[in-house]
Image (spheres, rainbow, N blue to C red):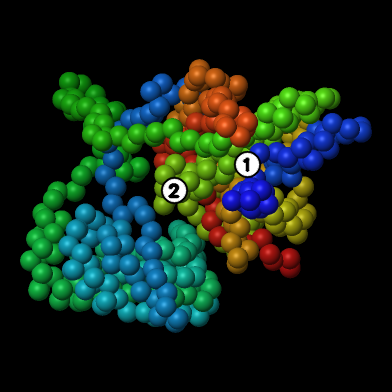
Amino acid sequence: MSVGEEVREESQQPQQSLGTSAARNLATTTKTAPQMQEISSRWLLRMLPWVQVQGGTYRVNRRLSYSVGDGRVTFVKTGDLVEVIPAELRELPVLRGFEDQDVLTRLARRCRQREFAAGDILTSFGSPADEVFLLAHGRVEKIGTGPYGGDAELGTLADGAYFGEQALLDSEAIWEFTARAATACTVLTLPRQELEEVAARSESLRAHLHRLRSIPEQRTNKYGEAAIDLSAGHVGEAVLPGTFVDYESSPREYELSVAQTVLRIHTRVADLYNQPMNQTEQQLRLTVEALKERQEHELINNREFGLLNNCEYDQRIQPHDGVPGPDDMDELLSRRRGSKLFLAHPRAISAFGRELNKRGLVPETIDMGGNRIPTWRGVPIFPCNKIPVTEARTTSIICMRTGEEEQGVVGLRQSGIPDEIEPSLSVRFMGISEQAIISYLVSTYYSAAVLVPDALGVLENVEIGRWK
């Protein structure tokens, strides 16, 4: 191989470290430290209480609860055709724990697609309930009768929700509310008759339904936890009930997650271009900033422990009018005691501010480390650009209670790891390659845990693009 071919081959190799020409930009003239647009305020990392996790695993022990169908149903769309994923039917209480995939597929094929315009009535209060509704797209309002005879809004349902599941087992069930489409809606319905026809041909489904009907109803409190028998207000020598507090037999465990990268610096840069700024320090500083940004992103969006994915279904609410109004924020606050903070995308905060302006309201602000943070009902609203904004210009607002003592949301980390430069963040020297490149392994370990379900709530599908 000629010298020219060797030079061309070397020039085609990808760059592995900072070049000398870029390094010289920090070695001459009056200058700033390297700037980085990705750096944000990272209020979640600053406000979240951090728990020391020895052994890398954090177990959340809870009182035993009986939960059925606490998730959402997922669909697939092909053109105008919407179909439910068969396995997702197990989110319905009547099919919870049913494992026969062939039967679930037959049930999914018997679901009927229906379209409703805004204002259409899906179900009427008091009428016979003989089918379950699976909401593929849109928003549905549940309307009931108030104590004085007027209409009372019982809640709002959105994509993935279902209602009427009791109709699949009870032939005498009636609708206890009126369901009205707030927007154009696409729903799938599964009539009780279809379930019975499939059950007539499936021994596994018949056995499942029989077992479901024969299991005695568990005594629970309003949170679904196993009841504790107590006696109060008695006189004389009344016989007191005996009881015990049952715990979950398989409590959830959170393993610390990790974000890592290998920082490479050429020895020539590290040796010659360190005045007046240390190149290694600046490279490491920006790398750590990027890792922290990714850490906060994961705490919000990770499928295993991220806050948006670990909020219980009954703690997710929908805005009454699409935009985030004061009434919606009050509803979010009312779902939990001792709320410590809101997290919202800056565009969501702006949209909420517009709604306050329309009503002539001025939110109070508090000082947090020299920053003026808006509040609602005394609870600060921190900006977080890691909360996603969809193409339809909708986002979410998170509200949480924090701290172990308050049974809230906590961050998890392990301090004291080898070569630590910050709690749970380490920089390890990995050696020098034959190309004279120094390598450092930069790692940060973290996770988050929700101690009880009502510690975390989310206002979903918040519109941020409406200006009138």
Secondary structure category for the residue under label 1: loop
Residue shown at the point (27%, 76%) measured from the top left: 109
Is 411 in front, or is 295? 295
Instruction: Judge the density around disc 1: few (<14), some (14-19), many (≥20) Cα neighbours within 10 Å.
Output: few
Q: Nearer the viewer, residue 296 or 352?
A: 296
| Extreme residue toward the right, this view | 29
Residue 193's x, y, as percent? 20, 76
Check disc 2 and report the residue beneath it. Answer: 303
Question: Residues under labels 1 and 2: Cα distance?
Answer: 32 Å
The relative height of residue 54 versus residue 458 in the rendered view (above or below) is above
Residue at position x 47%, y 52% from top?
A: 316
Q: Nearer the viewer, residue 7 or 38?
A: 7
Q: Taking 135 as reference, is 80 above or below it?
A: below
For label 1, the residue is 16
Amino acid type, label 2: Arg
Q: The disc labelled 1 sits on which kind of residue?
A: Gln
Which quarter of the rendered picture does the C terminus lie within?
bottom right
Q: Nearer the viewer, mark 1 or mark 2?
A: 1
Q: Which of 233/307 is in front?
A: 307
Q: Secondary structure at mark 2?
A: loop
Residue at the spot 64% in from the left edge and 56% down from the top edge? 325
Percent position (x, y) of residue 317? Answer: 50, 54
**Mark 2 crowd level (few <14, some 14–19, many ≥20, 10 Å Cα):** few
Q: Earlier in the sequence, mark 1 or mark 2?
A: 1
Q: Is residue 168 visible?
A: yes
Would residue 230 be found to the left or right of residue 423 on screen? left
Residue 442 showing in the rendered view? no
Asked if 358 appears above or below 306 in the picture, the reply is below
Figure check: 19 above or below 97? above
Q: Residue at x 77, y 26 (%)?
A: 272
